[in-house]
Image (tube, rainbow, N blue to C red):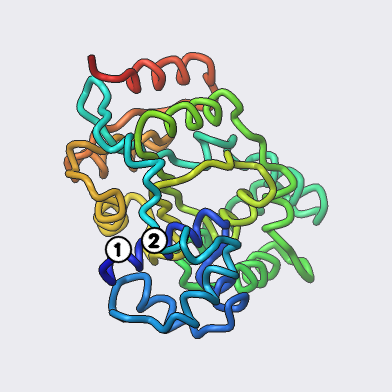
Amino acid sequence: MDEKSLGKQLQSMRLDAGLTQQQLCHKANISFSTLTKIERGAIKSPSIFTVLAIANAVGVGLDELLGNRAAHAGRLLKKTKSGNSFIFFDVNGCLVHFYQRAFAKLAEATGAPSDLVETAFWHYNDEACKGAISIAEFNNKLAKKIGVDGVRWQDFYLENVEPIVKMQDTLKWASEHYRVGLLTNIMPGLLGSMRKNGQLPNIHYDAIVDSSEVAAVKPEPEIFEIARDKAGVPANQILLIDDSRVNLMAAEKQGWHTLWFDDSRVEESTKRVLSALQPAD
C-alpha cells in the first residue's frame, strides 16, 4: 500500500470510529501535525508504532487497518440508471430533521426570544462549521449575543436531533449497492457524536466530508473539490442528495448530478430518491 492509500485508509477507519482528528490524536498520543500529514500522504513511511497506536485508538487490528477492505470492492462497478456510482448524503435536512426544535428548546431554557436565538445562531454558524472557531468559542459568542451567562449548543442539538427514518433506511440500502458518503456543513465534533449515539446509520462510509475538518462549507467550490477527491470517481458519477437548492446548484456547476430532498414531505421525497437510486440494467 502506498502512502496516499495508507493515508486514506487511516482516515476512513478514523471516520468509521466517529473520531475527529483531534480526538484520535488524543487517544493515540500523537501530534495533530503528524496525523494530518499521514492522512494526506505527506509522510511516506510512518513508524509501525504510530500506525499501531492509531489502530488501537480506532479499535481495529493492524491487519484490518492496512488492508484494502475487499468486502466493499464489489460496489465499485455498480451504477444507477443515470450513471452515478457514488452517492453523497447531506445530514441536516436529509438524514435528520433540521434543528428548529433545538432553537425552540434553547429559547425556552434561556428565556431569550426565539427570533434573537436564531439570528444570533446564524451570525456565527459558518465560522463554526468551517472550524474557524471551536464550539466552545461559538457557545461564548452565542451566549453573549442572546444575553445569558452560558450556552452549550451541542447539548441542545444532540438532545433534539430527530432522525428521518425512511431516509436513513434508504442510506443503508444504498450502501449495499453503491459507494456512499456524508457531505455536511456541521460544527466540530457533532458528526462523531451523532454516529456514536446511533443518531446516524452505523455503516461503512466510503467518504465523510465534515465541513469543520476541511475548513470549507457548502456551497463553496472548495468543499465539492475535496469531496470529489475523496470519492475517487469522476464528477459526473457523483450524486448529491441535499435539502438546499443553493448547495445543489453549486454541485451541479462542478458537474455532479443532484437531487433535492424536502424534509417536510418525507414520504414523497424518499420515493424520488429511491427511484433515482435504482441500478442500471
* Front position in the image: 90 or 203: 203
Assign the C terminus to one quadrant of the image: top left
Q: In the image, what residue occupies the spot 59% across and 70% down?
A: 56
What amino acid type should be assigned to the residue bearing mark 2? Answer: Gln
For label 2, the crowd category at 10 Å Cα-Cα, with few meaning under 14, some 14 to 19 and many 20 or more, is many
Instruction: Give SS at disc 2.
Output: helix
Q: Would you name the residue on which mark 1 appears?
A: 5
Q: Inspect this view and state whether residue 188 appears.
A: no
Q: Is residue 149 above or below residue 256?
A: below
Disc assigned to residue 9: 2
Left or right placement of residue 100 versus residue 92 in this view: right
* Front position in the image: 204 or 229: 204
Q: In the image, what residue occupies the spot 32% across and 35% down?
A: 74
Left or right placement of residue 221 versus residue 98 in this view: left
* Residue 117 in the image, given as x and y percentages of width and height: 66, 53
Q: In the image, what residue occupies the spot 19% across and 45% down?
A: 254
Question: Residue lying furthest front in this view?
Answer: 63
Mark 1 in CB contact with mark 2 (< 8 angstroms): yes
Disc assigned to residue 64: none
Q: CA distance from mark 1 to mark 2?
A: 6 Å
Q: Inspect this view and state whether residue 107 appears.
A: yes
Can you tell which quarter of the image residue 43 is in? bottom left
* Residue 157 in the image, given as x and y percentages of width and height: 67, 50
Left or right placement of residue 264 versus residue 100 in this view: left
* Residue 22 in the image, given as x and y percentages of width and height: 55, 74
For label 1, the crowd category at 10 Å Cα-Cα, with few meaning under 14, some 14 to 19 and many 20 or more, is some
Q: Is residue 115 above or below residue 56?
A: above
Instruction: Give SS at disc 1.
Output: helix
Report the label total: 2
What amino acid type should be assigned to the residue bearing mark 1? Answer: Ser
* Residue 108 in the image, given as x and y percentages of width and height: 80, 47
